[in-house]
Amino acid sequence: MSQATAIDWGYARAVAGRVGGTGPQIPLDEARAAVLDLRRAAQVAAPLVADRTGMFAPAEPGCVEVVDRAGWTQANALAFRSLLDPLTQRLANRNANRSSPVGAVGSRIAGAEIGAALGFLSSKVLGQYELFTAGPDVPARLLLVAPNIVHVERQMDVDPSDFRLWVCLHEETHRVQFTAVPWLGPWLREQIGGYLETIDLDG
């Protein structure tokens, strides 16, 4: 890690892992069955959402991923880093002349704060259309957090297949919204970037 680094992202992921944990303990065969069921539910959801909305949004190969909490954290750490890069670069430039220990401690604290937030969210999020790490060669992904989905369906004592389909319908709707309206994603990112530029680092 260089002195100019404003956020220790490796430390952020480590903190997130400790805060978020792994979720409910599930026998391996049940875990595999849940992953397959979620993938099937995502396939079922796609034409249902398309038929209901009338919006054309073909799914790219591999756009649906069933992940654990660590996988969700990794994806969102990358997204946060991408979104915050202009701000962290400003911080790095401001701190370039400060002593190395001060810079290292500051980046660790920032990493801990972001990691704690990611860890907390990783234990709550059921699914997410992950838009901000997409690029010309990397399609945006629909993430389904299997441990959290299983945890909630057990807590609520609902039919697993129905609940998993409901989650997939919800997240597929977001995917369709952003895919069928191509200007929406860049506009949202522009709005976030514009807000970050207004932050007074010395205020």
Image (cartoon, grey):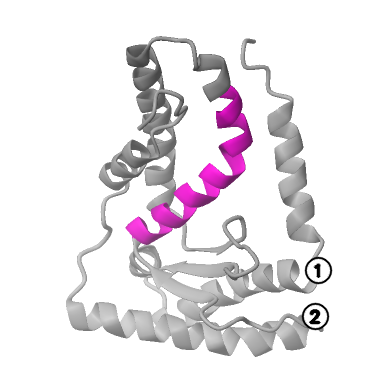
Q: CA distance from mark 2 to mark 1?
A: 9 Å
Q: Amino acid at mark 1?
A: Val
Residue 111 position (above or below residue 27): above
Residue 200 position (above or below residue 54): above
Q: Quadrant of the C terminus?
A: top right
Residue 178 lies, in percent from the top left, at 72, 66
Residue in front for this viewpoint, 142 or 132: 132
Element at label 1: loop
User: Disc 1 marks which residue?
Assistant: 181
16 part of magenta stretch:
no
Residue 37 lies, in percent from the top left, at 40, 85
- At 57% from the left and 46% from the top, the residue drawn is 82
Residue 201 position (above or below residue 58): above
Few, some or many residues within 10 Å of mark 2 (<14, 14–19, 20+) = some
Residue 131 lies, in percent from the top left, at 62, 60
- At 73% from the left and 33% from the top, the residue drawn is 195
Q: Amino acid at mark 2?
A: Met
| Residue 63 placement, left or right of 107 | right
What span is colored magenta in the figure? Answer: 69-91
User: Disc 2 marks which residue?
Assistant: 55
Q: Quadrant of residue 185?
A: bottom right
Residue 36 lies, in percent from the top left, at 37, 86
Q: Quadrant of the N terminus?
A: top left
